[in-house]
């Protein structure tokens, strides 16, 4: 069994083990295939490549991390990405989550506040031919209004509250997945759904630990 297959087997088992909290008993084949397709070792520092497919977060520099594969898969599943959708990611990091999403949607817009990470991720994604991903350096809390509304929004860093600008940029019928909580405190992976009339429903999914969502001062 190769590293990708071992990783996916772990994802399947963890999904089953956490179903009582998340409400998700199985990951869709589309999400599993996307997880298989992305070369995760290309998105971690060279010295950490031997750990790339282990189910844990890894440091990528500048105080940031690449999330553990299970959390990437779970957040992707919660978003329910469709092939004709346009999605916004806040927190590009190394570009791994954007690469996973790129296999599942029409277009990914991804924002990263740390300039060296944004530049490196953009180069990496171009080199790996993820042509439907566009990276922008900026304050992701404010979103990317030019391309709104989005079918889905994913935030890969913890915000003290659900960012209202991102809710506003969500299309009716869309989903926002975001860790909510204080840095180094209790955080909850949260799913926000906007109904066809623009009403908002919010539910807690799973306790998590993420780096904080940083803002321009």
Image (cartoon, rainbow, N blue to C red):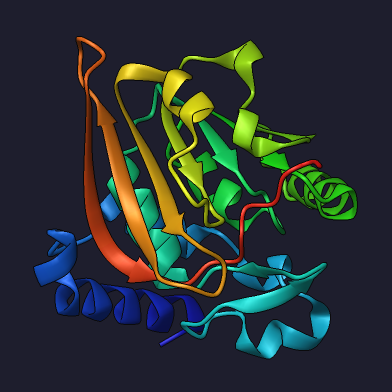
Residue at the location (56% across, 77% down)?
57
Residue at the location (79% across, 41% down)?
216
**Residue 138, image x, y percentages:** 77, 35
Task: Work out which quarter of the rendered image holds the C terminus and state it.
Answer: top right
Taking the image as shown, residue 52 lies to the left or right of residue 182, namely right
Taking the image as shown, residue 146 lies to the left or right of residue 26, namely right
Tell me: residue 198, above or below residue 131. above
Task: Work out which quarter of the rendered image holds the N terminus and state it.
Answer: bottom left
Residue at the location (37% across, 17% down)?
171
Tell me: residue 214, above or below residue 55. above
175 and 165: which is toward the camera: 165
Corner quadrant of residue 43: bottom right
**Residue 186, image x, y percentages:** 40, 71
89 and 4: which is toward the camera: 89
Asked whether residue 106 is in view, the answer is no
Asked whether residue 130 is in view, the answer is yes
Taking the image as shown, residue 83 lies to the left or right of residue 132, namely left
**Residue 109, image x, y percentages:** 62, 31
């Amino acid at each position: 069994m190769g590293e990708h297959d071992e990783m996916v087997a772990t994802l399947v088992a963890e999904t089953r083990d956490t179903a009582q909290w998340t409400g998700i008993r199985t990951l869709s084949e589309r999400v599993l295939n996307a997880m298989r397709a992305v070369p995760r070792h290309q998105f971690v520092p060279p010295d950490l490549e031997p750990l790339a497919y282990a189910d844990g977060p890894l440091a990528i520099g500048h105080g940031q991390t690449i999330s553990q594969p299970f959390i990437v898969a779970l957040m992707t599943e919660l978003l329910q990405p469709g092939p004709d959708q346009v999605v916004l990611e806040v927190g590009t990091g190394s570009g791994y989550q954007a690469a996973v999403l790129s296999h599942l949607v029409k277009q990914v817009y991804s924002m990263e506040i740390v300039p060296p990470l944004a530049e490196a991720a953009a180069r990496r994604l171009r080199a790996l031919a993820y042509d439907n991903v566009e990276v922008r350096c900026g304050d992701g809390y404010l979103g990317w209004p030019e391309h709104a509304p989005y079918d889905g929004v994913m935030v890969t860093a913890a915000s003290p509250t659900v960012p209202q600008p991102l809710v506003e940029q969500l299309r009716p019928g869309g989903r926002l997945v975001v860790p909510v909580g204080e840095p180094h405190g209790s955080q909850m992976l949260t799913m926000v759904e906007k109904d066809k009339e623009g009403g908002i429903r919010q539910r807690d999914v799973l306790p998590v630990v993420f780096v904080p969502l940083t803002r321009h001062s």
